Amino acid sequence: MHILLMILKILGIVLLVLIGILILLLCAVLFIPVCYQATGELFEEKKFHIRGTWLFFVLRVVGEIEGKAVTVKIQLFGFPVFSYPKAQEPNKKRKKRRKKRSRRVREKDTCVSKSDWEGKDTQQESEIEKELCHLEQSQIEKKKEKTRKSGKIKQILAKIGEWILMIPQKLKQLGKNLAHIKEMLYDENNKAAVTHGFQEIKYLLRHFGPRKILADLTFSTGDPAFTGQLLGVICIFPIIYQNDMHLIPDFESESAYVRGTFQIRGRIRFIHALCAGVRILKDKNIRNLIRK
């Protein structure tokens, strides 16, 4: 009986420790923010650098866009987990692998030549042939795995490209249904749901939006009148005055362009998204609007 109680006590302690670890992980995911930073240079060669970190060094995502070249790196506890495109091996490792392969091929050739000259039994020859066949099969399997992985990546990229190409068609369909959407939005029964939805969007933008913006940009739309109107609309938003943003309109250019540098910093806490989602699910008006 005493042994049984000790076993139950140990199991209870282990369960409590596991539950405590799960609660700590859940609290860390909900309350510890994901910090993001984006910098860009909009000149003849456009460059973008995006970085996101969570819990200092636990998770780190770095992305760079330079012209048409795109690189993405994901690190977990400082160790690389994913990289696109795959990093090439250093020259030293390549040379070592080539030397090892050449040695193996030489040893096989010498073994085969000795067996031919010494006139060994057919059993030894069959064993050598089996080894060679086994090596060839392993190389073929490795090549198949590489082709499968590359094929999956190509399929994902192709799906993304198809989705991007389908955007204009989806926008056209949305334009066709815009009248019906307007009727639903302006309906007296749906006004409460729409106002609550906009409130939740503002709440998320206030918490997820950038905390600091530094920008020094010059822009033009090609039409001086439209450039002035766009500048007036942009200056309405208080984010221009709350941050160090310098926007210089170009009324003389005949082509549309945006040039300059910018830097954005912010953070995201998932607890805000969870709270907004719970409030939306509790609202009966929003549930009825989603059903419609």
Image (tube, grey):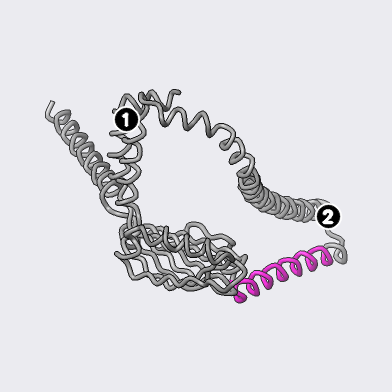
Q: Nearer the viewer, mark 2 or mark 1?
A: 1
| Residue 19 place in picture, x, y as percent | 23, 39
Give, as a three-letter code, the residue at label 2.
Asp
| Res 152 visible | no
Q: Which residue is mark 2?
A: 121
| Furthest residue in direction left, as rendered | 2
Q: Which quadrant of the rendered structure holds the C terminus?
A: top left
Q: Could you tell whether 170 is left or right of 2 in the image?
A: right
Task: Using the rendered image of the protein, determine whether residue 8 is visible from the camera's viewpoint.
Answer: yes
Q: Position of residue 45 (x, y in %)?
A: 59, 73
In this view, 90 is above or below 11: below
| Residue at image coords 12%, 29% | 2
Q: Which numbered dot is residue 192?
A: 1
- Which segment is the magenta one? 90-114
Q: Which residue is painted at 30% across and 46% down in the image?
A: 203
Q: Is residue 201 above or below residue 110?
A: above
Residue 133, x across and y down, in percent: 77, 52
Cα separation, mark 2 vs mark 1, equals 91 Å
**Number of other residues with Cα within 10 Å of mark 2, as a class: few under 14, some 14 to 19, many 20 or more:** few
User: Closer to the camera, 30 or 120?
Assistant: 30
